[in-house]
Image: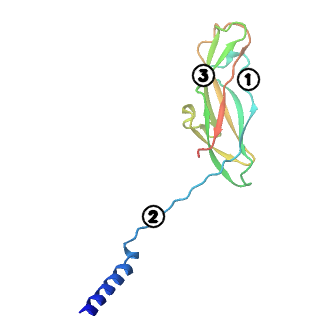
Amino acid sequence: MKKTLLGLMVLLSMTAYSNQDETGDSATINMSGFVYGELEISVEKHMEFGDLRKHTLEKPAYSVIKIKDSTLSDNETSIAKISIDETATLQNTKHPESQYTINLSLVDGAGVLPGASFKDAKVTVSKTGREYEVTGRVDGDVANITPGTYSGNFNIKATYEI
């Protein structure tokens, strides 16, 4: 009887240890990483209005920017996000109270880029660069504009969404 009990105990312990792999658990580890590109943005043409009376909402002035990433291969492109302000201010240099709002838009060859006024326009970037226009339209009546020199500026930013 002792031999039978001893045999049963050995058999049960072998069965318990042999099923241990089937009662385990596993997990999947995800991996991720990123590479920052080297976005470069340059101004190829600054926005020159000339006589402000001639630049209404229908006749914009424009500047040209170029965006490139030298880390891309020759035929490779990438997508970047452009942020610009919706408006900028042109101010008389001698009479600061005389100022005009300039409505800004980001434009490519096909027209105004979607989302440009919401600071999330998506643009294509290449190694040699792509050019985009930023148009500026004078908002308001310029018929009685105060004579003088007007100046202003605005920022444009290109980023990768990582």
Residue at the image point whose x is 69% and y is 16% from the top: 52
Q: CA distance from mark 3 to mark 1?
A: 15 Å
Most extreme residue toward the front is 2
Q: Are marks 3 and 1 in contact (CB under 8 Å)?
A: no
Give the residue number, with chain letter if any, for mark 1: 48
Residue 24 drawn above or below residue 127:
below
Q: CA distance from mark 2 to mark 3?
A: 60 Å
Residue at the image point whose x is 54% and y is 36% from the top: 115
Q: Nearer the viewer, mark 2 or mark 1?
A: 2
Q: Is residue 63 left or right of residue 2?
A: right
Looking at the rendered structure, the secondary structure element under dot 1 is loop
Q: Amino acid at mark 1?
A: Glu
Q: Amino acid at mark 3?
A: Leu
Q: Amino acid at mark 2?
A: Ala
Give the residue number, with chain letter if any, for mark 3: 57
| Mark nearer the N terminus (3 vs 1) | 1
Q: Quadrant of residue 61?
A: top right
Q: Nearer the viewer, mark 2 or mark 3?
A: 2
Give the residue number, with chain letter if any, for mark 2: 27
Badge 2: residue crowd in 10 Å (few <14, some 14–19, many ≥20): few
